[in-house]
Image (spheres, grey):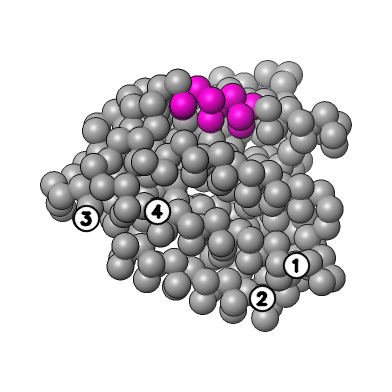
Amino acid sequence: MVAGMGAIVWGAELFAEHLAAASSRLGISAFALALLLAGAEPEELATVATASARGIDGVAFGDVIGANAAIVTLALAAGVFVTTMPFGQRVRRYGLGGLGAAAITGIIAWDGTVTRPEGAILVTGYIVFVATIWIAERQPPPLGETIELNEERTGPSRVGSDLALVIAGLAALTAGSIALVEGVKQLSGIEATQTKLGLTIVGFATAFELVVLAWSASRRGITEAVVAGVVGSYAYNLTMSLGAGALIAPIAITDATTIRAPYTAMAVLLTLVLALSTRDQTLRKAHGLILLLGYAGFIATALLA
């Protein structure tokens, strides 16, 4: 599991670091290449897809829910401890879209199953979500690891080497996801325990890259993109990651009650973020402490579910 976590973080970093250079030399946007190769959240996509393919469906559900809880609390907290984070109308649209995704996915997955047709609905929903924002803003929305991909990079490099490193990052993500999921499987063959591990350890591990990215981007003043990327990734995980996993193999767990309380807590956390930012459309250090407490509450809920 530890080896898998390390490979996932390293692969995501390698993927993000070289994606902009590869896309510019190919003549397409970094956003388009990100969606083409791995989407906005390659860690979650790879882990959910691997868990689904391996039949460890508790991890597939747990990773989506646990990662979302981590990114809207830990990632935003990491950002606000560096500087005040703006939360204007543009970002609020992402947040409301995330709540909409949570409602739709909750209806679909409340019985603990996501079929292939339902997975197709979720993937289509994400495409519509991105297209709507793209048209409204007339530019690609910043999601997940794509928030820093448009930085200017200099120095001699050929498209072949950059693209090779991007693919190497994807390979590391895939290998890391397989190792992580296999580690969970070896730790326990009990579905309820696998689900709890997905909600806590796996969810945190796959969200960790975005937490670090939010902290580093905030230090560089890319604050609005950080918030938009974090909140937008929430919708991505609920639709594209879970939907793609279900397209590979239908996702089903025996006891849906193990995910219902954590899923509700995950939705409440995003609602909390929107409520905290309502007054002056910003998130501050004091809000970061509340978000950390919110994540602790989620972990307690996940373990007691």
The percent position of residue 246, horizontal first and vertical second, equals: 39, 28
Label 4 or label 2, whichever lies nearer to me, is 4
| Cα–Cα span, label 2 and label 1 | 9 Å
The crowd level at tag 2 (other Cα within 10 Å; few <14, some 14-19, many 20+) is many
Residue corresponding to mark 3: 193
The percent position of residue 177, horizontal first and vertical second, equals: 34, 40
- What residue is drawn where x is 30% and y is 67%? 304
The percent position of residue 64, horizontal first and vertical second, equals: 44, 46
Residue corresponding to mark 4: 260
Which of the 4 image quadrants contains residue 249? Answer: top left
What residue range appears in magenta?
A: 118-127
Question: Disc 2 marks which amino acid?
Answer: His
Query: Is residue 33 visible in this depiction of the protein?
Result: yes
Marks 4 and 2, the one that precedes in the sequence: 4
Q: Secondary structure at mark 3?
A: helix
- What residue is drawn where x is 81% and y is 49%? 90
Q: Secondary structure at mark 1?
A: loop
- What residue is drawn where x is 62% and y is 21%? 159
Badge 3 vs badge 2, beta-carbon distance below 8 Å = no
Of residues 162 and 84, which is closer to you in this image? 84
Label 3 or label 2, whichever lies nearer to me, is 3
Q: Secondary structure at mark 4?
A: helix
The crowd level at tag 4 (other Cα within 10 Å; few <14, some 14-19, many 20+) is some
Residue corresponding to mark 1: 277
Question: Disc 3 marks which amino acid?
Answer: Thr
Residue corresponding to mark 2: 287
- What residue is drawn where x is 35% and y is 41%? 112
For the image, the number of numbered tags is 4
| Cα–Cα span, label 1 and label 4 | 26 Å
The percent position of residue 220, horizontal first and vertical second, equals: 74, 60
| Cα–Cα span, label 3 and label 1 | 35 Å
